Amino acid sequence: MNQPEDNDKRNEIAFSRRNWLKAAGGLVAMATSLRAEDVAGADAALELPLQLSINENAFGPSRQAVAAMTDSLKRIFRYPHAQSQQLIAMIAEKENVPGDHILMSVGSGEILLAYGRHFGAQKGEIIAAVPGYTQMIDVMQVLGSKVVKVPLNDKWEHDLDAMAAKVTAETSCVYICNPNNPTGTLCDAEKLKSFAIEVSKKAPVFIDEAYLECSDDFAANTMVGLVKQGHDVMVSRTFSKIYGLAGLRVGYAVASPQRIAQVRAQMSGNPNLMGAVAALASLKDKEYLDDTRAKIKAGRDAIHAVLRDLGKKHTASQANFVFFQTGMPIEKFQEAMRNEQVIVARPFPPMLDWCRLTIGQPAEIAHVHRALRKILG
């Protein structure tokens, strides 16, 4: 026999569920009524201080990606298995490899960490350029690996000959970030290809192409073809940069199934529904990709022109940021730029009087131009 408090409890639960469903329905209705153009594609208002320190895509995601996410809100209670499989198939087609050569991840950073954990456990050596991106290097060092740092050449590019000369029986892996972070410089494509083929006979080679789709000629510089040819190379990509999906954390790698199995064993994340849906839509929107690349190039070229006018050295960046010599300690330059409402990147030893600055929207770039002329002029 039911007790009165049991009935009250059930009524309370039923009422709570009705309220939750009503609220959830209202939320979905409100979200799905948003137009994609309301939240993507248009120049953002100038919000100070400008955040130009972490290489986000200031132009935002594809309108089609935003529309696809908005439409998918009503299915947010579903797991993203179907969309994830569609995304793997689409990426495999784009990269011209079988589906079992694709490893999805929560941003490409998860792959860097997992690869680092796998090879770091060997407590050997990792060969990497300096200055360079350190996410993989840091985790390997924590696990007991030795970092063999190779300075950049006089063009602030990877010194591939010097790196190849450092490979020994103790080498666990070699890391190449192309374009390099923080310098934005590209390796010569044919030289990098030869380097990766020869070095991978002795040690695995990891090529981080996070920024490559921001460059002037992606097709000529990607090293994914080496994977299909059977070389011990892993190439990583991200949807955070050119596709403007940094907040959704979607990345992937292309490698042999054997390497993928080793790296996947060190991973715990999975793509989410919104990330998978947005990535699928982004890959279909070639017009967005071409337009965003052109905007990034225009901003990059504009800042380079100002730096030339000011007589400041800068690298030949092919990423969505520029890297230039300030003529003062980076901490002093950071403070001066903060006073002008611009946040720039952290120090990159040993280049401690150089600055990395993310490409912003046209109004942001105009503000940056005035700040640079005031501080460096």
Image (spheres, grey):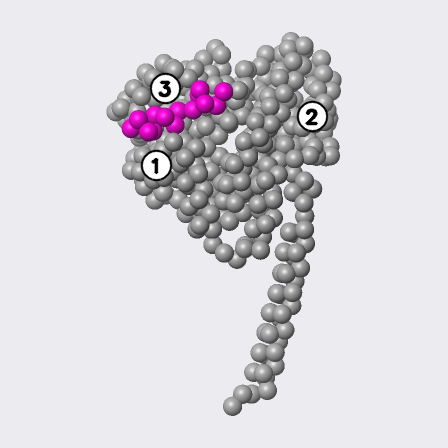
Residue at disc 1, secondary structure: loop
Q: Is residue 27 above or below residue 238?
A: below
Q: Earlier in the sequence, mark 1 or mark 2?
A: 1
Q: Earlier in the sequence, mark 1 or mark 3?
A: 1
Residue located beneath label 2 in the image? 362
Q: Residues within 10 Å of mark 3 (few under 14, many from 20)?
A: some
The one nearer the camera, 138 or 257, is 257
Q: Can residue 113 be seen in the rendering of this structure?
A: no
- x and y percent of residue 68 in the render? 57, 45
Residue located beneath label 3 in the image? 193
Amino acid beneath label 3: Lys
Q: Residues within 10 Å of mark 1 (few under 14, many from 20)?
A: some
Residue 98's mark? Answer: 1
Q: Can residue 66 be seen in the rendering of this structure?
A: yes
Residue at disc 2, secondary structure: helix
Q: CA distance from mark 1 to mark 3?
A: 21 Å
State whether the magenta stretch is mostly helix, strand or loop: helix
| Span colored in magenta | 217-230
